Amino acid sequence: MREGADRETIRHELGLVVGVQDVSLRFPAGEVSVIMGLSGSGKSTLLRLLNGLHRPTAGTVMVAGANLATLGRRALVSFRRRQFGMVFQRFALLPHRTVRANVEFGLEIQRLPREQRRVKAMEAISLVGLQGWEERYPDELSGGMQQRVGLARALAVSPEILLMDEAFSALDPLIRAELQNELLALQARMRKTVVFVTHDPDEALKLGDWIAIMRDGAVVQAGRPEEIVARPVDDYVAAFVQRVDRTRALTAGAVMRERGGAVRTGDDPAAVLERLRRDDLPGVCVVDENDRLCGALGRERLSSLVAGGVRRLDRGMLRAAHAVPSDTPLAAVLRIAAQGGCPIAVVGPDQCVRGVIFDHSIMAVLAGQPQPPMGEAVRRADGVA
């Protein structure tokens, strides 16, 4: 491949399959990272590289300061037992063992004393809501309950990293949604580093703090969910996220216009009005010298100020404006916009304006049009920041 051969050429001429190629990723600690792609894209292969079940033919796999690609077999097995928990699509439960005995299995491999195994297993069973079922066998459980056992078994060994390979794909939609919610609730309490593989965009966007999309063994885009939905890098990614519910996936920060949507008190109304006409904007937010929101102005109000000979904007000329944090769900932004609330200021933790949302930017994102990054939030009417 270094000589320019593609995946199909290598398969045809050498009879080899390239599972993963040219992948360089850093998974955020304490967050849920999702690897998403179609069947055969390489996502499960990448997951198995992460815990050493597959060895890379080139490159490194760094986990907690160790390069898994160079560890010997015994060291790798020991490292894997300490660092990783694994949840599989098909449950992988031992049918002759009870729920508790299945959850204890990894602890037995770690050679923990029996009483410690029992305590840790019961803690994990309680975490996944299976109290009272610990002496039942897998064939007495529903699919959702069996997957809870698999999750409890992975959590019982107190792993630093939880790997989940299509863990909910075999479940009915309602049970699947229920387990997704339970995983999010557990993650809010435990803050594990989770790497979750799925082919379902809605599942990826619901669970993922960070997402990598794969195609033909390569990562085509990686980033926060709202970045991927609002700004897909190519047609493949755009098609992948086309049918997702954008009101749930996107936030105010993803749809705001980061430049040109705000001006300062003291600016010339004539220059502001000219900018609105040039940029085809219906209105503007006005901030003070510290970038704090003062209010908003529409074209009609600006026109009357210009006609009246006003040369400088001040607070008394402005109407009230809505402000929302950048992580506000788009659904909540839509409710404000439906009441005639645009333009809407987007503020950071310091309450400074980071961007502005207009009706047309919301409609563009809902229609699937990519949002280009724009730069600074506030610009003087004469173009000087």
Image: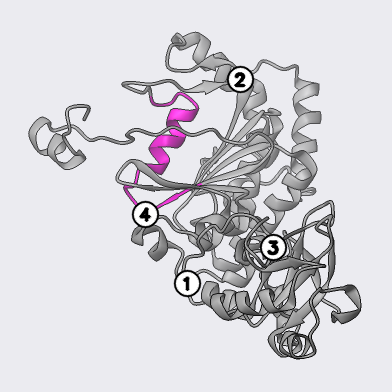
Q: Look at the picture and state if 368 lies above or below 75.
A: below
Which residue, given by chain and number where applicable, does mark 3 sit on?
A: 380
Front of the two marks 3 and 1:
3
Comparing 180 with 266, the one in front is 266
- Labels 4 & 1 near each other (Cβ < 8 A): no
Give the residue drawn at x 61%, y 68%.
174
Give the residue drawn at x 51%, y 69%.
244
Please indicate whether residue 89 sits to the left or right of residue 185 in the image. left
Which residue, given by chain and number where applicable, does mark 2 sit on?
A: 64
Q: Amino acid at mark 4?
A: Leu
Distance from the alpha carbon under mark 2 to that under mark 4: 30 Å
Which of pointers 2 and 1 lies earlier in the amino acid sequence? Answer: 2
- Labels 3 & 4 near each other (Cβ < 8 A): no
Please indicate whether residue 4 sits to the left or right of residue 28 in the image. left
Which of pointers 2 and 3 lies earlier in the amino acid sequence? Answer: 2
Q: What residue range appears in magenta?
A: 35-54
